[in-house]
Image (cartoon, rainbow, N blue to C red):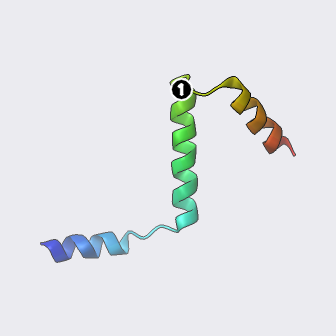
Amino acid sequence: MLESIRKSAATAHLPLGILVSGLSLTTFGFLLVQDLLDPIVVFFLQLYLAF
C-alpha cells in the first residue's frame, strides 16, 4: 500500500512555478479577506503591477 501512495504522489507532479504562484495567490487572498493586510501593502502591490 505504501508503494501505491508513492506512485500516486510521483505522478501528480506540478511545475514548481505554478505551485508557488498558486500558493502565494491563495495566501494573499486569505490575508486580504481576513483584513490582515495593511492597506499600504496593497497600494505598493498595485503600484508595482501597474508598471
42 is higher (above) or lower (below) than 7: above
Q: Secondary structure at mark 1?
A: helix
In the image: residue 35, left or right of residue 45: left
In this figure, what is the number of numbered marks? 1
Q: Residue furthest left?
A: 1
14 is higher (above) or lower (below) than 31: below
Q: Which residue is rendered at x = 70% and y = 32% of the image?
A: 41
Q: Dividing the picture into quarters, in which one does residue 2 lie?
A: bottom left
Q: Dividing the picture into quarters, in which one does residue 46 lie?
A: top right
Q: Which residue is rendered at x = 58% and y = 63% of the image?
A: 17
Classed neighbour count for the residue bearing mark 1: other residues with Cα under 10 Å, few (<14), some (14–19), many (≥20): few
Circle 1 sits on which residue? 33
Relative image position of residue 24 (x, y in whole percent): 56, 47
Q: Nearer the viewer, residue 36 or 50?
A: 36
In the image: residue 16, left or right of residue 6: right
Q: Residue furthest right?
A: 51
In the image: residue 15, left or right of residue 47: left
Q: Nearer the viewer, residue 37 or 22?
A: 37
Q: Which residue is rendered at x = 57% and y = 38% of the image?
A: 28
Query: Is the N terminus in the top left, top right, bottom left or bottom right quadrant?
Result: bottom left
Relative image position of residue 8 (x, y in whole percent): 28, 71
In the image: residue 9, left or right of residue 3: right
Which amino acid type corresponds to the residue marked 1 in the rendered image? Val
